[in-house]
Image: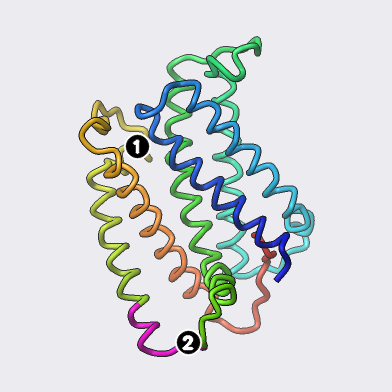
Amino acid sequence: MSPLFLIRLVLDFTAAGLLLVALAYWWLDNTSHELIGTGMFVLLLSHNVFNRRWWARLPRAARGRPWLVTIASNISIALVMAALLVTSLLMSRSVFAFLPVSGGPTAREIHILAAYWAFILAAVHLGLHWSMITAVAGRLLRVGSPNAIRTAALRAVAGAIAAYGIHSMVVMGIGDRLLARPSIDFWDFQESTAGFFLHHVAILGACACAAHYAAGWFRRPSGVRRVTDAGE
């Protein structure tokens, strides 16, 4: 396993962490929010530079259900991130305030909508690559061959996280946010900051679990070549 590959994984997880922190807008001041978002986009740019070969061979990709899952996930998250970036530039009051552009209420609504879709799609992206991530972790931690007890225990943990994640979606009103429904409910960070992040990590885990097992079902047929790369 090359050191560069490990660095790429660390950068990818850092980008996901920055996205999570950026969602806690009312916990941050605006400048911090913009700096965190800028750092996230820099890391996302490096992610796509590392995976430029995946995008280059996309037109020649093999067709099939696994192909559709991977391509749909990557293109969706690319489009959502593009919307998030554009609205970030339009709304910036600190980092990019020098730009001769300005956004209004519509840009803000699109920005919030794109942010939550980016979070969900990032979780799906993580789930689609979970087998690769666990394989890397297993080699680093020198975990032995799979056994029934460990597999059952891990599945039980995943099930518990998924169940709590579904509960957290209701608590955080994720459905309304993904549908851009108006809401006046905001998390009270003075009461509990950890609770905000715990709920969102659980939501991430639930979506990643769903994507992982759904991808396994889609990839069951034999003889279909996957379109993948070390980071995609």
Residue farthest along the left direction in this orientation: 191
Identify the residue shown where x is 30% and y is 48%.
199
Q: Is residue 144 above or below residue 101?
A: below
Residue 149 is covered by the magenta coloring: yes
Identify the residue shown where x is 66% and y is 56%.
7
Residue 170 x, y percent position in the rendering:
24, 47
**Nearest the eye: 209 or 32:** 32
What amino acid is labelled 1 in the image? Arg
Residue 139 x, y percent position in the rendering:
59, 76
* Dominant secondary structure, magenta: helix
Residue receiving disc 2: 146
Residue farthest along the front direction in this orientation: 141
Tell me the magenta residue range.
Answer: 145-153
What amino acid is labelled 2 in the image? Pro
Task: Give the total of numbered labels.
Answer: 2
Crowd around label 1: few <14 · some 14–19 · many ≥20 (10 Å): some
Instruction: Provide the secondary structure element on which disc 1 rests.
Output: helix
Q: Is residue 17 above or below residue 208?
A: above
Identify the residue shown where x is 54% and y is 25%.
87
Residue 34 x, y percent position in the rendering:
53, 26
Foreground mark, 1 or 2, reads 2
Q: Earlier in the sequence, mark 1 or mark 2?
A: 2
Quadrant (top left, top right, bottom left, bottom right) of the C terminus: bottom right
Instruction: Provide the secondary structure element on which disc 2 rests.
Output: loop
Q: Is residue 20 above or below residue 53?
A: above
State the mark number for residue 177.
1
Quadrant (top left, top right, bottom left, bottom right) of the N terminus: bottom right
203 vs 75, left or right, is left
